[in-house]
Each structure stands twice: as structure tokens, then as C-alpha cells.
């Protein structure tokens, strides 16, 4: 299994990614402040059955920063070109948090390329799932904190991604990832969340859809999960105990079990 970062040039962007395994393609889309390293356990555990592909979105991880007008549809189109370069025509998509909103937009533009959809701890965009004043506060915080020293930002943000019981090793792992954040990418991703209301897209999804949620997710609460479940025809919600917002890292065994069962049945 190759856990090293590989690279592709897509237009004027250098895209970093990790790829492991063989079989049906499984594309992993991370949240903001994260990158492909957040999928370490999925790359390791699911690669026995799947061709697991985790990119660093433009403005994150080892990828270059996009232009300052980059919007959600630009990420979707770049993702399509990225998959073209890997000769992946059709895949199951796992989108976590911001990555889940990207997965919805990718489906909007390229529905024929989506075999199955797994949305984890995400939103119908902040605009589509949260009160307007909450959206304003979140965006303002992201814009303000994007100028903090890297270690200070990590210290402020990591704890709210997990439950209070998260082990120190997990906290340190995510802190290291958050400390490598791209200020511009963080601001642009936050803006795309604040600008997006994907409720109309949800109603038009006609592929099998699984929702995976941390029981103790305080950033995207179970009420948001229920909104998505009730909006997407036939969607199934699975709640993971003892998990917060980044449920795939805090409870990887339970998360991977849900993904595996969903994608092979």
C-alpha cells in the first residue's frame, strides 16, 4: 500500500493525493482544515476491497492554492479532471463535513459518475442547514482565525472535532494536520459552506445514499443528519457511538464497517 503523497497537475494546480488497493473506486473527500492524512485508517483498512483514493483538495495539504475566486463548483470540476487523470469514470464517494458538501455538488454536476454516496457529519451547506446568524458567526470566526499562528489555530479547533474521551494520540495527530492548514484554502472553503444551500440537490439524488454521523457531533448535530435523511430519497442514517465531528478518525472500525457493508451490498 502506498501511503506516500503522489501528485498530478490539473490545469494550473498541483494536486496531492494518496491511493491504495484495487477494486471498485472509493473516493474520499476531506473537510476543511484537513487533508488526505485524515483518511489514514480508511486507506489502510478498506484497500483490501477497494481502490481507495483520497485527494488533498486545492487549498489543502500538499496541493497548491487556487485563485481567490475559487467556488464550490470549481472544486467539483477540478475533482472531475483529477479523476479523469486517474482513469476513474465512476466511483462511490465518501464526503466528510465540507467534503460532504463537495460530494453533493459533484453529484449535481456529474451524477452519472457517482455509483453510491456516503455523506458523513456534513450539511446541506451551512446556508441550507443552519440559522442565518449561526452561519454569519461561523464564517466570521473562520476568516478571523485563518490569520492565527498555525499551532494556535490547531489548539483552538481540534478539541471540538472529537468527544472529550478522544485519546491524546488522536488529538496530537489531528493537531499536526490542522497546523499545516492553508489560510486561503480555509477561508475559501468556509465561504463555500456559508454560500451553499443544497436542499434542492438532496431531493434529486437517485443513487443509494448512506449518512454516517457521530453521535456526539456538536458541529453538525443529529438534527442536520435527520434533515438530510428526510430530504434524500431512500437515504439511510447510521449513528456511530462515542464519535464527534470527525467520526472516521475517532471511531475508524465502526466507520469503516458501515462503508464496507454499504458498498458491497
Image: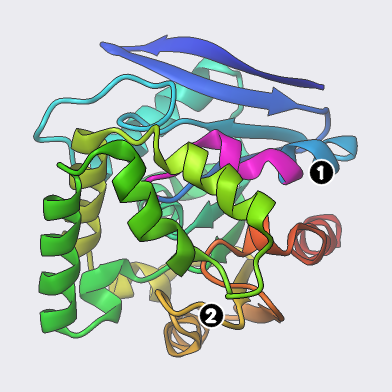
Within the image, what quadrant is residue 211 found in? bottom right
Left or right: 18 in relation to 85: right
Please name which of the two marks, 1 or 2, marks the residue nearer to the observer.
1
Q: CA distance from mark 1 to mark 2?
A: 27 Å
What is the secondary structure assignment of the residue under circle 1? Answer: helix
- Residue 40's spot in the image, x, y percent? 69, 39
Colour scheme of the picture: rainbow
Does the image show residue 50?
no
Left or right: 229 in relation to 10: right
Which residue occupies the foreground of this view, 58 or 138?
A: 138
Determine whether 53 is above or below 231 in the image: above
**How crowded is the residue under tag 1: few (<14 C-alpha within 10 Å), some, or many (20+)?**
some
What is the secondary structure assignment of the residue under circle 2? Answer: loop
Q: Residue at x 85, y 56 (%)?
A: 264
- What residue is disc 2 on? 233
Q: Is residue 257 magenta?
A: no
- What residue is disc 1 on? 46
Within the image, what quadrant is residue 14 found in? top left
- Residue 127's spot in the image, x, y percent? 20, 72
**How crowded is the residue under tag 2: few (<14 C-alpha within 10 Å), some, or many (20+)?**
some
- Residue 109's spot in the image, x, y percent? 35, 47
Q: Residue at x 40, y 72 (%)?
A: 202
- Residue 159's spot in the image, x, y percent? 47, 64
Q: Residue at x 49, y 45 (%)?
A: 175
Q: Is residue 35 magenta?
A: yes
Placement of the C terminus among the 4 image quadrants:
bottom right
In the rendered structure, which segment of residues is drawn in magenta?
A: 32-41
Does the image show residue 76?
yes
Left or right: 43 in relation to 132: right
- Label ID, residue 165: none
Amino acid at each position: 500500500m502506498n501511503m506516500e503523497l503522489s501528485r498530478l497537475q490539473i490545469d494550473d494546480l498541483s494536486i496531492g493525493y494518496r491511493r491504495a488497493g484495487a477494486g471498485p473506486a472509493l473516493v474520499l473527500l476531506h473537510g476543511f482544515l484537513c487533508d488526505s492524512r485524515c483518511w489514514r485508517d480508511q486507506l489502510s483498512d478498506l484497500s483490501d476491497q477497494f481502490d481507495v483514493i483520497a485527494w488533498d483538495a486545492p487549498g489543502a495539504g500538499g496541493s497548491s492554492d487556487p485563485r481567490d475566486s475559487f467556488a464550490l463548483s470549481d472544486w467539483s470540476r477540478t475533482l472531475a479532471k483529477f479523476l479523469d487523470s486517474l482513469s476513474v469514470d465512476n466511483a462511490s464517494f465518501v464526503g466528510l463535513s465540507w467534503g460532504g458538501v463537495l460530494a453533493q455538488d459533484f453529484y449535481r454536476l456529474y451524477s452519472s459518475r457517482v455509483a453510491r454516496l456516503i455523506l458523513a457529519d456534513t450539511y446541506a451547506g451551512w446556508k441550507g442547514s443552519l440559522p442565518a446568524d449561526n452561519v454569519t458567526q461561523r464564517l466570521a470566526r473562520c476568516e478571523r482565525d485563518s490569520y492565527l499562528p498555525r499551532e494556535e489555530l490547531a489548539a483552538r479547533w481540534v478539541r471540538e472535532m472529537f468527544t472529550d474521551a478522544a485519546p491524546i494520540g488522536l488529538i496530537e495527530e489531528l493537531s499536526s494536520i490542522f497546523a499545516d492548514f492553508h489560510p486561503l484554502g480555509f477561508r475559501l472553503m468556509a465561504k463555500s459552506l456559508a454560500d451553499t444551500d443544497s436542499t434542492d440537490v438532496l431531493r434529486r439524488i437517485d443513487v443509494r445514499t448512506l449518512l454516517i454521523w457521530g453521535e456526539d457531533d456538536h458541529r453538525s448535530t443529529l438534527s442536520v443528519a435527520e434533515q438530510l435523511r428526510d430530504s434524500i430519497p431512500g437515504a439511510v442514517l447510521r449513528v456511530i457511538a462515542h464519535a464527534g465531528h470527525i467520526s472516521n478518525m475517532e471511531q475508524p472500525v465502526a466507520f469503516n464497517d458501515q462503508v464496507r457493508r454499504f458498498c458491497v451490498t
